[in-house]
Amino acid sequence: MTTILQLEGLGKQLHPPDGPWLFRDFSASVAEPLIISILGKSGQGKSTLLRILGRLTAPDRGSMRLQGRDVSQWTPEAWRMTVSYVAQQPVMLPGSVEDNLRAAAFLHQRSFDLTQARQWMEQIGLDHLDWNSGAQQLSGGEKQRLALIRTLLLRPAVLLLDEVTSSLDSISKQATERLLVDLHAHSGTTILWVTHDWEEARTTSQQIWFMADGRLLEDADSRTFFDSPRTEEARAFLRSSHLLAESLEGIR
Ligand SMILES: Nc1ncnc2c1ncn2[C@@H]1O[C@H](COP(=O)(O)OP(=O)(O)OP(=O)(O)O)[C@@H](O)[C@H]1O
């Protein structure tokens, strides 16, 4: 495996120059192809980290290298075509479902892969949609999946996913997870995946980043993290996640 992304001492300060640090000293290597889940309690800065990696937010400290080249040697556009972010709250572009699907091809002057778009729409459970209908009228879960496919059509080497299954029912969620795992297996796409669903993380990912106390507390292969987490913070996090899952199971 080769290193595609190298993070060195990344930090984000809430109110620079004197405010507290949301996180700092975040250093890690991303080897390709891997699926890495990013776990941690709310407010640890997981989304902010993804936005930094997607060059949508600037870090207050630290550096990043992509494919061996420092961030300063990349234009933001070229970086974002290689490392692409899918937001938790999907933003639909004005126009139809098809306009949204064609957006990446249009913006980057590439040909539109109609066969691939149809196949992914079907695989993700959106084959019922009329491509001429307005994208703004879709349900939250439909928008979330359409935004994901719109980004997949860019064919990024690294995909940054921010809770992309959070609005989905269990069947759509499983279909989405399967599509992403298949894509990773067949195309070697590297995925950094923020999720609150530890079961999703355990079943899809080979590696876990666990954020707590304003830093990357654990960077471990998935089995090691779930079977024998190194820190008390991770053990407490997993205990509370298990308890929550059990109580939700009881309600069902
Ligand atoms: N540029 C910024 N300036 C000020 N505050 C910010 C900035 N970016 C993020 N924050 C704050 O940092 C905190 C962490 O946000 P973030 O969404 O990254 O955490 P998270 O771990 O992804 O949380 P969740 O799991 O709830 O989505 C939040 O309180 C947010 O309001």
Image: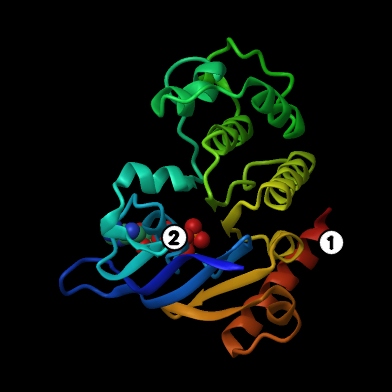
**Point 55% across, 24% down: residue:** 101
Q: Is residue 99 placed above or below 91 in the rendered structure? A: above
* Residue 139: percent from left, percent from top: 60, 28
Q: Residues within 10 Å of mark 2 (few under 14, many from 20)?
A: few
Q: Residues within 10 Å of mark 1 (few under 14, many from 20)?
A: few
Element under disc 2: loop
Q: First in sequence: mark 1 or mark 2?
A: 2
* Residue 120: percent from left, percent from top: 70, 31
Question: Mark 2 sits on what residue?
Answer: 67
Q: Nearer the viewer, residue 239 or 29?
A: 29
Q: Is residue 219 left or right of residue 184?
A: left
**Quarter occupied by residue 43:** bottom left
Element under disc 1: helix
Q: How many marks?
A: 2
Colour scheme shown: rainbow
**Point 52% across, 45% down: residue:** 156
Quadrant for the N terminus, please: bottom right
Disc number lying in front (1 or 2): 2
Q: Nearer the viewer, residue 251 or 120?
A: 120
* Residue 63: percent from left, percent from top: 31, 69
Q: CA distance from mark 1 to mark 2?
A: 47 Å
* Residue 249: percent from left, percent from top: 82, 60
Q: Is residue 228 left or right of residue 71?
A: right
In the rendered structure, which amino acid carries the disc numbered 2? Gln
In the rendered structure, which amino acid carries the disc numbered 1? Gly
The reply to whether the residue tagged 1 has its Cβ within 8 angstroms of ligand 1 is: no
Residue sticking out furthest to the top: 132
Question: Mark 1 sits on what residue?
Answer: 250
